[in-house]
Image (cartoon, rainbow, N blue to C red):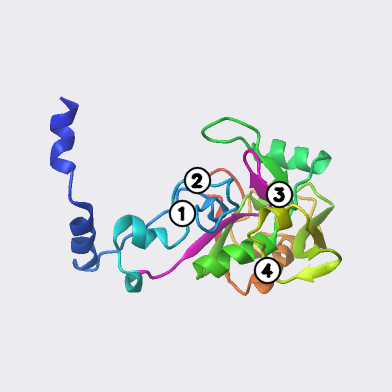
Amino acid sequence: MYAEKIRPLVKDGVYFMYQALHGPSKKILVEGANAALLDIDFGTYPFVTSSNCTVGGVCTGLGIPPHYIGKVYGVVKAYTTRVGVGTFPTEQNNEIGETLQTRGREFGVTTGRKRRCGWLDLVLVKYAHMINGFSALAVTKLDILDTFEEIKVGVEYHLDGKQIPYFPANQELLNKVTVKYKNLPGWRCCTEGARTFDDLPAEAQAYIRFIEEYLEVPVKWIGVGKSRKSIIKLF
């Protein structure tokens, strides 16, 4: 019974995408299934998934020619998380990490395991931007940081006492890096009711602007809660 209902919906994928691309004002939204650092080619191998979940996967996975790719939006939490093993330079194995995990309800979707949590790692995000070329960013879960008096952001990696200007692909090197942080003041108030950028406290606005300036990528959306209405659109 189910096969009979599904069979008419089965199409040749390449031809279907070609028709969609050449149809009248058709727009195609492609979503990566995993984070950039889980990409099999550009992620923190061997702790990766089995496919290309960076923007190149649009071409290799769907057969879409590169020149058809338009806007590329990156989605990043206001702090950094990881499920399972793998190098995590800004991880906080302390009360800070526990607070982020508890407030953010950070559990792996598939395994149910607790996600490891730490401060936002902008070196890592910049690496993702180098690969994907983000047009703009969506910063989610800003409200999880509401209780912190001070918020740190990872801005440099150092190896053997010297700054390295890149995200090392070599796990042996990545395990040895130390992180230089930028300390920013927290806002210590609830942001869940904010619906415009001006509704956010000045410190939260400064946090977003710091991300933009560091990455040289505009933030287009800010998430401040679980509701679909809890999205601030900047432009």
Residue 53 circle label: 1
The magenta span reads 69-88
Amino acid identity at mark 2: Thr
Q: Are marks 2 and 3 in contact (CB under 8 Å)?
A: no
- Say if residue 220 shows up in the picture: no
Which quarter of the rendered picture does the N terminus lie within?
top left
Q: SS at mark 1?
A: loop
Is 40 or 125 nearer to us in this picture?
40
Rate crowding at label 2 as few (under 14), some (14 to 19) or many (20 or more) other CA atoms within 10 Å: some
Residue hosting label 2: 49
Residue that mark 4 sits on: 166
Reading the image, the residue beneath label 3 is 88
Residue 14 image offset from top left, x and y in percent: 22, 57
- Check disc 4 and give the amino acid type: Tyr
Q: Is label 1 in contact with label 2 (beta carbons under 8 Å)?
A: yes
Residue in the picture at 80% in, 63% down: 159
- The mark lying in front, picked from 4 and 1, is 4
Mark 2: secondary structure: loop
Label 4 to label 1: alpha-carbon separation: 21 Å
Q: Closer to the N terminus: mark 2 or mark 3?
A: 2
3 or 1: tag closer to the N-terminus: 1
Task: Indicate yes or no whether the magenta region holds residue 73.
Answer: yes
* Label located before the other in sequence (4 or 1): 1
* Closer to viewer: mark 1 or mark 2: 2
Residue type marked 3: Phe
